[in-house]
Image (spheres, rainbow, N blue to C red):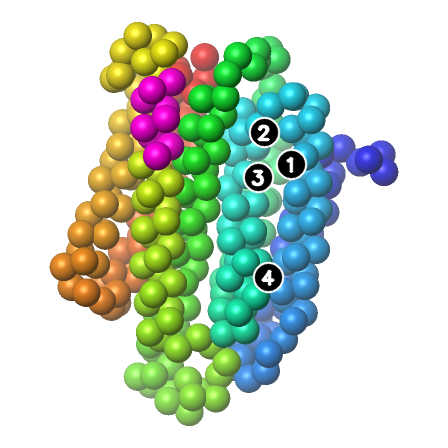
Amino acid sequence: MLGFTDRQWFALAVICYGVGAAYSVLLWRRGFRRDDWTLYSLLATGAILHTVAMLQRGFSIDRCPINNLFEATMFIAWTIVAAFLLLGMWRRLRFLGVMVSPLLFALGVFGLFPLLDERGPRPAFVHGWESLHAALVLLAYGAFGLSAVAALMYLSQEHNLKFDKTRAVLALLPPIQRLERVTSGLVIAGFALLTLGLAVGTWWLHQERGTFLVSDPKLIWSVAVWIAYGALLGLHDRLRTVGRRFAWSVIGVFVFVLLTFWGTNLPSAIHNP
């Protein structure tokens, strides 16, 4: 396809995300005083290039491209940008891109490190349970990432309402109540996807190894993440509101996921047979 490799297509997407991240600084300085399609268009262009990269990688290996850390990073970033483009169709949610673009750029730069794209023997595609499990779990992490972005926007708007009411009124940021609903809704969606993904993974493990439980660092980590987000939803349901504590907790748990996802994947015998 135009002579580019999948990594080169992805690198072009990362460049678009980087330009979007730089442009986001201008939007912050302007105080979000106008409805600007430029950032949305930059991320949409990056998403198209990103999709081409994933399709080319998938067709080259005849399976869902989620088999090493480069592909997993690429997939998570794709779910985040795809969800943003959907939410960005609503004008008041379009400025989530200000937080999304730096996250996408950081994930993209990290994913392009050569050591992450190690290819072992070409795996046999026996059934789709393994791919379905991985896709659902990575979609969940994408939803959690976007929930962290919405939580950051919530904290920013709350700060403006407390200390700079004029800026908060004039800005085109979403109302704080809408950001509350978006944050909690994305956490719920991510938790549902993660629950389904873990259930499918457990079934696949039983089919392959005849057991539902194994002592594996990635499995233990995944259950810990599931418990953490379940506790967040329990807190939200109890308080009936998002609030600063919930927003910071959403951000904190996702930062934990980002910092530990790749480290727990490496020693996993299941994910690195």
Residue behind mark 4: 21
The secondary element bearing badge 2 is classed as loop
Q: Quadrant of the C terminus?
A: top left
For the point 47% across and 77% down, which residue is it? 173
Disc 3 residue type (three-letter): Met
Indicate which disc residue 65 carries: 2
Residue under label 1 = 54
Q: Do residues under tags 1 and 3 come within 8 Å of each other at their CB atoms?
A: yes
| Mark number, residue 127 | none
The image position of residue 222, as x and y in percent, is 31, 32
Give how far across and how far down residue 133 sits, in percent: 42, 28
Residue 212 lies in quadrant: top left
Residue lying at 85% horizontally and 38% vertically, measured from the top left? 2
Identify the secondary structure beneath mark 1: helix
Q: How crowded is mark 3: few (under 14 residues within 10 Å), some or many (20 or more)?
A: many
- The answer for how far apart the CA atoms under marks 2 and 3 are is 9 Å
Q: Gap in Å between the C-alphas at discs 1 and 3?
A: 8 Å
**Do the residues under discs 1 and 2 have CB atoms within 8 angstroms?**
yes
SS state under label 4:
helix
Residue that numbered label 3 is attached to = 74
Q: Does the magenta stretch include residue 197?
A: yes
Question: Residue drawn at (56%, 52%), measured in percent from left and top?
Answer: 81
Labels 1 and 2: the sequence-earlier one: 1
**Please, which residue is most extreme toward the bottom here?**
166
Q: What residue type is labelled 1?
A: Met
In this rendering, does residue 18 appear at all?
no
